[in-house]
Image (tube, rainbow, N blue to C red):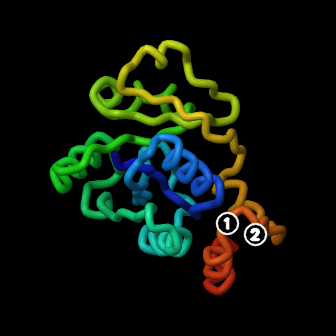
Amino acid sequence: MTGLFFGSFNPIHIGHLIIAQHIYYEMSFEEIWFVVSPQNPFKSSKGMLDKYERLHMVNLAIEDCPYFRSSDLEFSLPTPSYTHASLEAFKLRHPEKSFSLLVGSDSLQNMARWKNGSVILNDQHITVYPRPGHPPDAHFFDFSNIAISDAPLLDISSTDFRKSVKNSNPKSFLVPDSVWTHINKQLLYI
């Protein structure tokens, strides 16, 4: 099975990588694909770097990991990016693969608000990782298509990282060295 880790990745940080690596080993996935979303319908585009810039940083972050891969599939789809449309596109382009959607427990709790969220919730294999303040609801344990990961609970966010750079107090250890070097060189998030 291939894990699909959707995100803005503005920028990708070590929390994304730690969770993906943990799930890769825990669930015995073939690969994890980091799917860069041009525009999440629930997030503002204010402060969002260009999608190709974010994809480049994902590629820098995963370049030495053979079981991680980036995807720009959503770049060719209408924006904002709707997960159900992206999942259908993945299935059409890769009929030989089975996919699991990787989501945080906070996203799982809000999935009913997503476009076609109930279809995803009932028909798609989903792997859930814990998010601070959002333990998985007990009724999700009854879904045969939902796997609950014991990935570490990490309170790291791209938003906090961007704020730290903007405030001249960069928390450079929150992103891979290659990403930090790129951010510094291009003067991003200042």
- Considering the image in quadrants, where does the N terminus appear? top left
Instruction: Look at the numbered discs 1 and 2 and tell me whether their residues touch, using CB distance below 8 Å.
Output: yes
Identify the residue at image location x=52%, y=42%. 26
Identify which residue, 189 or 37, lies in the foreground: 37
- Residue 54 in sight: no
Spot occupied by residue 137 in the image (x, y as percentages of width and height) = 55, 18
In the figure, is residue 166 to the left or right of 125?
right
Q: Name the residue beneath numbered marker 1.
A: 175
In the figure, is residue 161 to the left or right of 17?
right
- Outermost bottom residue: 185
Query: Number of labelled discs?
Result: 2
Identify which residue, 140 or 65, lies in the foreground: 65
Q: Name the residue beneath numbered marker 2.
A: 172
Figure quadrant of residue 117: top left
Spot occupied by residue 82 in the image (x, y as percentages of width and height) = 33, 44
Name the kind of residue labelled 2 in the image.
Ser
Badge 2: few (under 14), some or many (20 or more) residues near its Cα, within 10 Å?
A: some
- Considering the image in quadrants, where does the C terminus appear? bottom right
Image vertical order of residue 144 relative to residue 82, above or below: above
Name the kind of residue labelled 1 in the image.
Val
In the figure, is residue 13 to the left or right of 8?
right
